[in-house]
Image: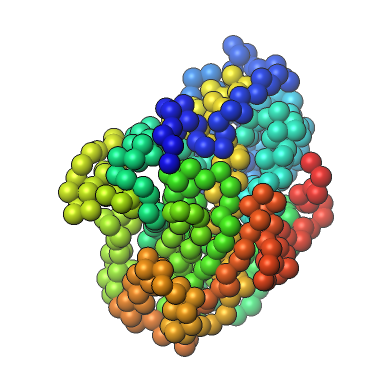
Amino acid sequence: MEPITRRDFVKGSAAVGLSLAMPFSRTHGANNDIRAAVVGIRGQGANHINLFRNIPGVRVVAICDADKQFLDREEQKFKERNEKVETYIDYRKLLEDKDIDVVITATPNHWHALVTIWACQAGKDVYVEKPVSHNIREGRQMVKAARKYNRIVQSGTQRRSDTGLAEAIDYIRRGNLGKIVVVYGIVYVRRGSIGKVDGPQPIPQSVDYDLWCGPAPKAPLMRKSLHYDWHWVWPTGNGDFGNNGIHFIDICRWFIGESKVAPRVVSIGGRLGYIDDGQTPNTQIVFYDYKPAPIIFEVRGLPRAKGNSAMDEFRGTRAGSVIQCEHGYFVGGWAYDNDGKKIKQFKRTAGSGHHANFIKAVRSRKVSDLNADVLEGHLSSALCHMGNVSYRLGHETSRDQVMEVVGDNKEMVDSFERFQEHLLVNGVDVKATPRILGPWLTMDPEKERFVGDFSREANVLASRNYREPFIVPETI
């Protein structure tokens, strides 16, 4: 594997060389300030308000949310600081404001693509939270929009701005531990049941439900909570793989230097241990058949054992990436030899400069200044979606059937045996909440289309049916 320069590993693999001189089509505010709008402000968006307003030369001048209670809450904070802010319920109205330079979005996943594409069309730059898209096709359309309209679009995969991690990638790629053999992504985060309702639930009076649903079906609310639990149903979310896993599969792909989606994928998992209104798996193994070093991703939402509040660990991490090489491995900021002896530490920064990096690129008009260009975010998000597509096309399975699929792949056999032990110590009844084995899916990495067996069904799930007028366009 070729060593990379510092410029390469800070910028990421696919964005290098995309330094485009792009004219800034609008005039900045007073004192050359960047004027920002934050869309979706219940949780992470509220954090973004503070993160961006504390960057020198940036003013948050507008906020938007389909739930008025959060608009009122954040507007009050602006009043207490004696700062002026415009408020919007309908994002389309915000886009008409020519005094907004950049849009930061932390909406639910199903809105990410439209917020980004519409902002690009309106001549505004975008910081879009992870995963950048709700499905594979949307992510590619977002990349096209960023390029066509000469916009700066940063993905919210902030670990791309972790300088210690970038140094570790350079260290590994230079062959200091030998060739990469296999890469693991780990997300062991406790996720309990969201409960089960016996009929449609009331929509909070503060919510414009038509706008909240946007491109998703405007269906009755069939779960206790409208907010946050949207992660665990397919019309709006992508499970914990898309929620937390996106960070770590992005790191996995970064380490192996892949600038395309994987050629093959298979998923094993289930919503195991409880029956509720969630649809996405709480326990999952996904195998990406990259050559010569595959990626194995593991998601666990159940605890270490029944009655134990702690979570499992793999090679000392509950949420991270493990890079296994010929002569050692990397995890948690350290390079180890194969006996577990520490070799070298890389001081991690957790991507604290990610938001400032976006603003730097907004000013320079250079895509190559971004640490996480939308293309990088799209490719890693698409990997999450590929794994979930395999899962959604799967069926209840036995242990023997899974072993037939994993064959003589010793790493996958090990992952599955640990998966089985995890279910056993949690007392999971696989008859009540079954394991699901998805099919092997083959992808054309250039066209980002599934081919071969199950491709027709898989390509349906690689996009979605949109609800007018909230349609991600066919042509950008």
Q: Name which residue lies at 68% across and 30% down.
A: 151
Q: Which residue lies furthest to the top in this view?
A: 31
Q: Can residue 69 be seen in this view?
A: no
Residue 105, image x, y percentages: 60, 41
* Residue situated in front as seen by the camera: 380 or 349: 380
Location of the C terminus by quadrant is top right
Q: Name which residue lies at 61% across and 14% down.
A: 32
Residue 260, image x, y percentages: 58, 47
Location of the N terminus by quadrant is top left
Residue 397, image x, y percentages: 51, 83
Q: Can residue 55 be seen in this view?
A: yes
Q: Is residue 210 rendered to the left or right of residue 345?
A: right
Vertical order, 96 against 429 (above or below) = above
Q: Name which residue lies at 62% across and 63% down.
A: 442
Examine the image and state in which quarter residue 120 appears: top right
Vertical order, 141 against 203 (above or below) = above
Vertical order, 76 against 214 (above or below) = above
Q: Is residue 215 rendered to the left or right of residue 358?
A: right
Residue 54, image x, y percentages: 47, 26
Vertical order, 145 against 61 (above or below) = below
Q: Name which residue lies at 57% across and 34% down.
A: 15
* Residue situated in front as seen by the camera: 138 or 49: 138
* Colour mapping: rainbow
Total count of labels: 0
* Residue situated in front as seen by the camera: 472 or 210: 472
Examine the image and state in which quarter residue 90 appears: top right
